[in-house]
Amino acid sequence: MPTYISMIKYTQKGLEDIKHSPDRVEAVRKATRQAGGDLKAFYLTMGQYDAVSIVEAPNDETMARGVLTAAMRGTVHTETFRAFTEDEYKKIVSSLP
């Protein structure tokens, strides 16, 4: 299953309601499972981003739907990347001309 890394920034609305953010993480975990994926990890971070999540999802469309759903709530902005495992990376590199 593809892996995705999301860099998360809280919006003003998200910060004003920060005490409920653990509940939102659990809601994301549940919704991700219902969509056939798995929230592998969530980290609170310091620096340019407020949090990072690592998600496995069945495909890009499922992940995009999840990210857009989170954005619609207005509590976070995300920047999401498709991540390749080390084995996937080796396969890609070995196929280069």
Image (cartoon, rainbow, N blue to C red):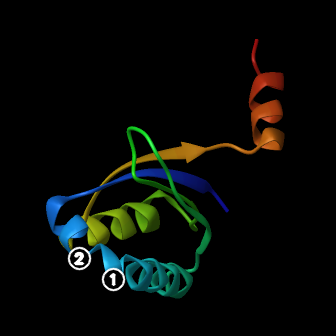
Rendered image: mark on residue 62: none
Image quarter for residue 1? bottom right
**Residue that appears at 15% across and 68% down:** 13
Residue 20: numbered disc: 1
What x and y, as percent, mark residue 56?
A: 61, 64
Q: Residue at position x 45%, y 77% from top?
A: 25
- The residues bearing labels 2 and 1 have C-alpha atoms spaced at a distance of 6 Å
The residue that appears at 48% across and 84% down in the rendered structure is 26
Is there a contact, CB below 8 Å, between mark 2 and mark 1? Answer: yes
Query: In the figure, 27 relative to 41: above or below?
Result: below
Could you say which is closer to the camera, residue 59 or residue 9? Answer: 9
**Residue 10: x percent and y percent?**
28, 58
Q: Inspect this view and state whether residue 74 appears.
A: no
Viewer-side residue, 44 vs 39: 44
| Above or below, comparing residue 39 to residue 77 in the picture | below
Please, which residue is most extreme toward the top here? 97
Amino acid type indicated by mark 1: His
List the residue tagged with mark 2: 17
Q: Is residue 54 visible?
A: yes
Q: Is residue 84 left or right of residue 28?
A: right
SS at mark 1 in the image: helix
Rendered location of residue 35, percent (x, y): 50, 81
Specify few, some or many for label 2: CA neighbours under 10 Å numbering under 14, 14-19, or 20 or more: few
